[in-house]
Amino acid sequence: MIEELALKTDSKILLLVLDGVGGLPKKARLPSVGQGYTELETAKTPNLDKLAQKSITGLTDAVAPGITPGSGPAHLSLFGYNPIKYQIGRGVLEALGVGVSLNPEDIAARGNFATVDAEGLIIDRRAGRISTEVNQKICKRLQTEINKICAGGTSLPDGQQAGAFGRENVKVEVMPGKEHRFVLVFRGSGLDERITETDPQKTGNPPLICKPLVPEAEKTARIVNIFVNKAKSILSPPRSDKRSGTEPANMVLLRGFAKLPKLKLMQERFKLTPAAIATYPMYRGLASLVGMDVLETGYTIEDEILTLKKYWKQYNFFYLHIKKTDSFGEDGNFENKVKIIEEIDKYVPILLELVHQSTDNVFVITGDHSTPSLLKAHSWHPNPFLLYSKWIIPDSAKRFTERECMRGGLGHFNAVDAIPLMLAHALKLKKFGA
C-alpha cells in the first residue's frame, strides 16, 4: 500500500541511526558513571533534550517483541523491508560494503580475526580489535598464500593435496574490512550457502567445523574448512612471528554465509532519492543493497556531518549511521558509550540547521537495536525513537531516553512502520481511497 501511495517531492528526510544506543540501568560504584541509569540517561545531552521536547517519541521493535536482532535485519526494518521476509546474510552486506561486486553464484562470508590459546580455545573473538592497517597486511598475506593453493603450489597442514581450491574450480578472495573484520568470497559453480558457521560467538570454545545443512552444500563446507585450516597455519603461533605484526590474530571465525538476494529498491518503492553516510562496510553494503548511493566519508562523526552538508541538496533521504555507540556497548564500556552520546549531542544544532531549510523536512533519531553495556551484546529491548517535523503534536517527553520514549505519543510499534511515518510527515504519501 505504501508503494502505491508514495509521492516524489522535494522535502527531505534525515534518519540518524545511533547503532545500539538503547541500554539498561547500571548501578556503578562510581557516582559519576550513573547510579541506576542507562547510558542515554547518564549522558549530558542538552540539545537532544531540547529537541525531544519539540518532537513525538516512542519505542520500536526491530523484528518482534523479545527477538534479539542482528544488525542486518534491524536496519532492513528501519528502511521499510520486513526483516522476516527479506533475510540477508551478513557476508553479502560486508562484501558490498567494501566495494566487492558479487555474481549470483558467489558466496560471501563475514570474517573475524580472533585469538585462540595453545589449546585452540577462543580467548578474544575480535583479536583485541587490531588496527585496520594490521588487518590489511594480514589479508594480503592470506590472499598470497591462498593464490598458491589455487595454483597447486603448496600443501595443506592436514595432508590434503595442493591445489584443493583449484580442483573444485573455486576462486577465493580475502578483503580487509575495519579493525578485526574481513570479507571472504568464494567464486565458482555449485556453491551452496546452506552451511553452518565456524564462529561459536562466545569465548572459551574452539572454532566450529563448518558442516553442510543439505547434501548440495557438502562441497562448500569442505572448501570452507580447507580455508580455515590454511589460515590457521599461516597465522599461528600467536606470539612468535614478530615480523608479521599479527600476534593477537592467530585464527579466523566465519559467519553469515550468503548469496546475493534481489530486492526492490527504495527509489521504486518509496519514490526516494536516497543516500547513505556510514563508515563500516556492513552498513554501507546494506544501504547499497536497497538502492542508496553510498557517499564517501571520513571515519569521525565530524567527517560524516561534513559529508551530509556537502551532499544535502542532491538527495531527499539520508541515512546517517553512527557505529561507536554499538562498539562500546559490545565492549561493556559504559563510560565511553556515554561519551559518544554526548559527542553526538554537540552536532544536533548543525543537523537542525539543515532540516530547517524547508518546512516539510523530517528528522528522525533512533537505534537499529539496543546494545546495553551491561550485556555486552545486542538485546531484545526496544529502541528509543524520536520524530521531529512541523506536522506533529509534541508529546510529554523531556529527554531522548528509553524511559521518556516509553511515554511517547507514538507508543510501541514495529520499526518497519517507521518509513511510512517519515514519508507521511514529509508529505510524501497521498490519500488512501476515495
Image: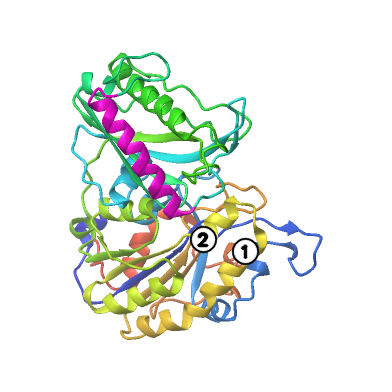
Q: How is the image coloured?
A: rainbow
Residue occupying image coordinates x 22% and y 63%: 6
Q: Which residue is mark 2?
A: 324
Instruction: Tell me how far mark 1 sits from mark 2, CA to CA.
Output: 9 Å
Q: Secondary structure at mark 2?
A: helix
- Which corner quadrant holds the C terminus? bottom left
Query: In this rendering, is residue 199 above or below 225?
Result: below
Residue 399 appears left or right of 184 = right
Residue 133 appears left or right of 396 = left
Question: Nearest the camera: 155 or 29?
Answer: 155
How far from the left and from the top, in percent, is residue 423? 31, 67
Whether the magenta-drawn stretch holds residue 136 is answered as yes
Q: Which residue is mark 1?
A: 336
How far from the left and from the top, in percent, is residue 155? 34, 20
Q: Tell me the amino acid under the disc marked 2.
A: Lys
Residue occupying image coordinates x 46% and y 44%: 70
Q: Secondary structure at mark 1?
A: helix
Residue numbers of the magenta segment: 131-153
Q: Tell me the amino acid under the disc marked 1.
A: Asn
Query: In this rendering, is residue 408 above or below 86?
Result: below
Q: Is residue 52 visible?
A: yes
The quarter of the picture where residue 305 lies is: bottom left
How far from the left and from the top, in percent, is residue 98? 31, 51
- Total labels: the figure holds 2
Q: Are the residues flagged by discs 1 and 2 in contact, CB closer than 8 Å?
A: yes
Q: Residues within 10 Å of mark 1 (few under 14, many from 20)?
A: some
Q: Mark number for residue 193?
A: none
The quarter of the picture where residue 268 lies is: bottom left
Query: In this rendering, is residue 93 above or below 2?
Result: above
Q: Residues within 10 Å of mark 2 (few under 14, many from 20)?
A: many
